[in-house]
Image (cartoon, grey):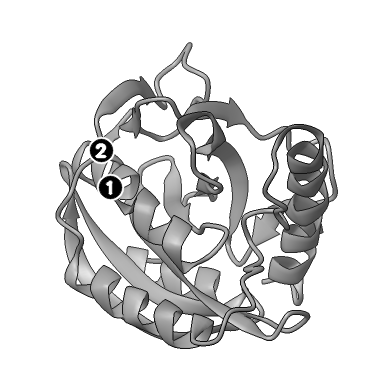
Amino acid sequence: MLVGAGTARRRMVQVALLAGVLAGCSQASDGETRATSSAPGATSEASDTASEASAGSGAVAERGGTIGASGSACELPVTFDIAKGWKAEAVDAGAASDALLRQGPVTAACEVDAKPAGNIGFLRVWTGKPGDDDARTVLKAFVAAEDGASHAEYREVKAGGLNGVEVSYEYTSELLDETKPERALAVTTARGPVVVHLGGLDAEEHRAMLPAFELAKRTLRTA
């Protein structure tokens, strides 16, 4: 595990997304991974949403395509459906140092951007090397590597045709002193572990994007 990798990754994403939003969006964003709402009750709203996430939203987004297979936008150890309007793009591991792209035992492999569908956030896929760690161990290491993560709640889930572990937790920005919910799912495959992570600009955006996470979870298969 690289100490501070979660923070470094978030700073990289913050700069990239902020530049895009300033160029073509009237809403200021700090890169999906930083909440910007300063309204009273933002922290309690995030806590409430995290509790809702733990129970499962139930709603599933409309399918817009499938990624993961050879020839798709992102070639991965798994395949799953992405929400209509969302745009997938492979992460170039050579574009930045490992510290910027790595979180715990996994490395960023794919970003599915919600902005074309009207939301500010990403569904990110992280992959790792084959090993003996089970999905829960991988997921706990992933969350532990994210500075500011707290109140993690883990549960066993069925992810499409695979057994997996899901976590709902809160992320607090040390810089902004604000909190928002996040969610992630981990499975293991013969080609290594896979973590699917959903953040969001703030609690409201996260809640709006949960159906896309549910779609990915319910359609997950080994590639």
Report the disc number at residue 211.
Answer: 1
- Residue nearest the observer in this picture, 128 or 13: 13
Query: x, y percentage for residue 114?
Result: 50, 38
**Residue found 28% across the figure and 69% down from its top:** 53
Amino acid on which the number 2 mark rests in the picture: Ala
| Label 2 with label 1: CB-CB less than 8 Å | yes
Who is closer to the viewer here, 25 or 84?
25
Amino acid carrying label 1: it is: Pro
Seen in the picture, residue 123 relative to 157 is either above or below; the reply is: above
- Percent x, y for residue 97? 85, 50
Query: Who's the residue at 57% across and 59% down the image?
Result: 201
The image shows residue 18, relative to residue 184, as above or below, that is above
Q: Tag on residue 87?
A: none
Q: Residue at x 45, y 55 (%)?
A: 198
> Residue at position x 70%, y 42% from top?
26
Q: Is residue 131 visible?
A: no
Secondary structure of the residue carrying numbered label 1: helix
Counting from the top left corner in percent of width and height, residue 43 is at: 50, 85
121 over 154 or under it: above or below: above
- Residue assigned mark 2: 61
**Residue 209 higher or lower than 73, as above or below:** below
Question: Is 29 situated left or right of 159 in this image?
Answer: right
- Give the class, few, some or many, for how many residues have Cα within 10 Å of label 1's Cα (few <14, many ≥20): some
Quadrant assignment for the C terminus: top left
User: Which of the two residues, 155 or 208, is positioned nearer the viewer here?
Assistant: 208
What whole-number distance in Å separates the C-alpha atoms at marks 2 and 1? 5 Å
In which quadrant of the rendered image does the N terminus lie? Answer: bottom right
Decide which of tag 2 and tag 1 comes sooner along the chain: 2
